[in-house]
Image: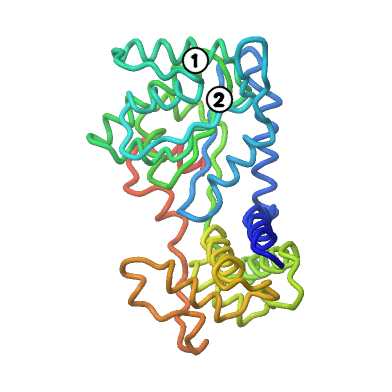
């Protein structure tokens, strides 16, 4: 196998996507929202929340890929408009991000102009769905409460214009965007929460091991890696804290080390490859933790992931009961 073949094989491994049952169900709910649209009424919003690595952004990008842009007479039509919100975003930065996704790169406008032009361009573009991903970046900038309220007001204006439904995706603290604006909360049709898999729950463990089995099958290795066996699955779970995104990262890094650096044909994913990937990829405080692929299995600690309630709705206030019910 020459270098070009090895790189092509690594690229194919990097593209592997496994539709687990709970992710497939959420995707179908989003497709249903696209099909239903606004139905002549005010549009609705939906929320997809969860910690880093649980598959939120991947799922939303896959939905966008299912509805690719279409070239029309003088412009590119996006049936699903995906907008990634940059870190520390203000209301103005949110408006600019939406306009850039629509192909408008003009600047030096007043805030009222930005709001008006966002509504105008979205109405003209007429997407079937608007995805705003990484909404926690809005509530992490400056005056969090005020910024969340102002940005929520822009989202409410888009919903009022009945352009299209909106998906709000991000980490749990992004719920502040809806909490800060009661009218936005009323418009929220549903909320889904993605959690890391809990090794101490048999159902979660079975699903996690099924994911590893399917991933190994898709890799097309010539020798068994047995990623789904209890020992290897447990070590991968420890390394990733049960998050699918982190698990995938370690597997892809191990494949890259073998195929690109070691010029190997990658017969299997070994503990040694995963140990090297883990040592290279972990950062900060994690560097003090033992490498789960080198440690004795019985020395590894099983820590239950934080509970959904703590992650979903930090610092609940009186007016948050409706959001609690949604989640």
Residue shown at 68%/60% (left/top)?
A: 9
Q: Quadrant of residue 283?
A: bottom left
Along the line of sight, the residue nearer the viewer: 214 or 199: 214
Q: Is residue 29 above or below residue 209?
A: above
Find residue 25 and name its label: none
Q: CA distance from mark 1 to mark 2?
A: 9 Å
Image x and y of residue 62, in percent? 63, 41
Image x and y of residue 131, in percent? 53, 32
| Local secondary structure at mark 2 | loop
Residue shown at 75%/66% (left/top)?
A: 220
Q: Quadrant of residue 139?
A: top left
Image x and y of residue 183, in percent? 42, 23
Residue where numbered disc 2 is placed: 44
Q: Is residue 299 left or right of residue 203?
A: left
User: Which numbered disc flags the more N-terminal residue, 1 or 2?
Assistant: 2
| Local secondary structure at mark 1 | helix
Q: Is residue 108 above or below residue 216?
A: above
Q: Residues within 10 Å of mark 1 (few under 14, many from 20)?
A: some
Residue where numbered disc 1 is placed: 160
Q: Quadrant of residue 206?
A: bottom right
Residue shown at 33%/17% (left/top)?
A: 107
């Amino acid at each position: 196998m020459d270098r070009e073949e090895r790189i092509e094989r690594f690229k194919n491994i990097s593209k592997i996507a496994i539709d687990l049952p709970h992710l497939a169900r959420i995707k179908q709910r989003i497709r249903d929202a696209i099909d239903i649209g606004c139905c002549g009424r005010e549009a609705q919003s939906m929320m997809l929340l969860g910690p880093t690595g649980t598959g939120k952004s991947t799922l939303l990008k896959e939905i966008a890929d299912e509805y690719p842009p279409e070239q029309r007479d003088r412009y590119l039509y996006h049936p699903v408009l995906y907008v990634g919100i940059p870190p520390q975003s203000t209301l103005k930065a949110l408006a600019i991000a939406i306009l850039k996704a629509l192909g408008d790169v003009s600047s030096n406008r007043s805030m009222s102009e930005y709001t008006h032009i966002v509504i105008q361009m979205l109405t003209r573009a007429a997407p079937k769905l608007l995805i705003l991903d990484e909404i926690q970046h809005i509530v992490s900038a400056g005056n969090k409460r005020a910024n969340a309220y102002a940005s929520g007001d822009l989202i409410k204006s888009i919903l009022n214009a009945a352009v299209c439904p909106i998906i709000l995706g991000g980490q749990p603290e992004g719920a502040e965007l809806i909490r800060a604006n009661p009218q936005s909360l009323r418009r929220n049709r549903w909320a889904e929460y993605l959690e890391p898999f809990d090794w101490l729950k048999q159902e979660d463990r079975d699903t996690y091991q099924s994911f590893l089995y399917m991933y190994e099958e898709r890799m097309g290795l010539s020798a068994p890696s047995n990623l789904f066996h209890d020992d290897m699955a447990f070590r991968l779970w420890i390394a990733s804290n049960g998050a699918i995104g982190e698990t995938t990262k370690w597997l892809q890094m191990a494949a890259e080390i073998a195929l690109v650096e070691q010029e190997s044909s990658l017969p299997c994913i070994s503990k040694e490859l995963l140990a090297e990937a883990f040592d290279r990829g972990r950062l900060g405080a994690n560097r003090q933790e033992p490498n789960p692929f080198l440690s004795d299995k019985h020395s590894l600690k099983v820590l239950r992931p934080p509970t959904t309630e703590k992650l979903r709705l930090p610092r609940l206030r009186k007016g948050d009961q409706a959001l609690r019910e949604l989640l």
